[in-house]
Image: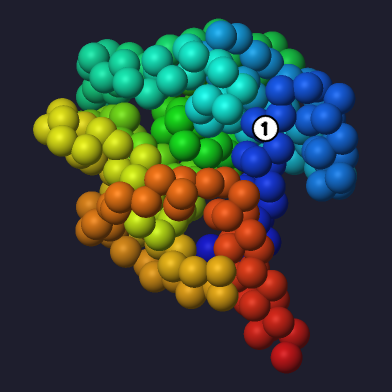
Amino acid sequence: MIDWRAAALAAARANAAYLIDENAARSAFTALGEIWVGNYANASHQAVLSADSDGNTFLSISGTRASALKLMDVFCDVSLEPVAVEGGNVTQGAVEGMRDLWEWVLDTVPQDDVVNVAGHSLGASRTHLTPLFLPAKQIGQLHSFEAPKFADAGYYAAHAAALAGMVCVLNGADLWAAWPWRDSRWQSRPLLDHVWLRDDAGSFDIVPGAEWPGGANGGDHDISTVQHRVEVIAAAQEAKTTA
């Protein structure tokens, strides 16, 4: 059972994680009712640690910051050489810098703290890599929004248990979540049913990741659209429970 309100908040965090200016990002997370813990940035990605009033910790990983001319992000999207990791292979671009990011996370949060992770696009694919860096007992809710295919079948099989509770969301006929389009090494998705958002009215389907047909619409690869559509579904589900 999907917690749609949690998914909507995760999408909002993933959206806010794109903000380059720290003050703007801090304000965005504060507007969500969260406590700003800190942010991390290097040439190829950025992420924010926040917490809610109950003490839950959230790591939100940005996707490709192409509009901010962060060219290393784009380079990571197209760096498809395999890197061997526990259980399988992932792309060089997806795993680039992740060890440093997670060292920062673990140095910042309390020891043995449970970390909830979310990301959009490249950040979503990096969310899939959480089991490489975080012990299973510390993995909280995982939310993946419009992830490209940057890990192989062996990886997803090896980490199926750790990723079993992840909520994976795809949107419309998204061109970039279908990337890489033809590289036979990278055609796998998590072994989970995925949410397939269909329109702004809250229509969606639940499909195995391998059965999502992809598409050719670059405009569907948009975290603001995804956030809005998930919020519509969350509101509809809440209305049903209170009716």
Q: Position of residue 83 (x, y in %)?
A: 27, 14
In this view, the residue in front, 208 or 108, is 208
Q: Position of residue 224 (x, y in %)?
A: 62, 49
Amino acid type, callout 1 = Ala
Residue drawn 35% across and 56% down?
Answer: 173
SS under mark 1 = loop
Q: Using residue 92 as the reference point, say whether residue 120 is left or right of it.
A: right
Q: Using residue 79 as the reference point, say whether residue 135 is left or right of it.
A: right
In this view, the residue in front, 29 or 56, is 29
The answer to whether residue 127 is visible is: no
Quarter residue 57 falls in: top right
Residue drawn 58% across and 27% down?
Answer: 67
Q: Position of residue 125 (x, y in %)?
A: 42, 33
**Which residue is labeled 1 in the image?**
17
Q: The C terminus is located in which quarter?
A: bottom right
Residue drawn 71% across and 23% down?
Answer: 20
Quarter residue 53 falls in: top right
The answer to whether residue 15 is visible is: yes
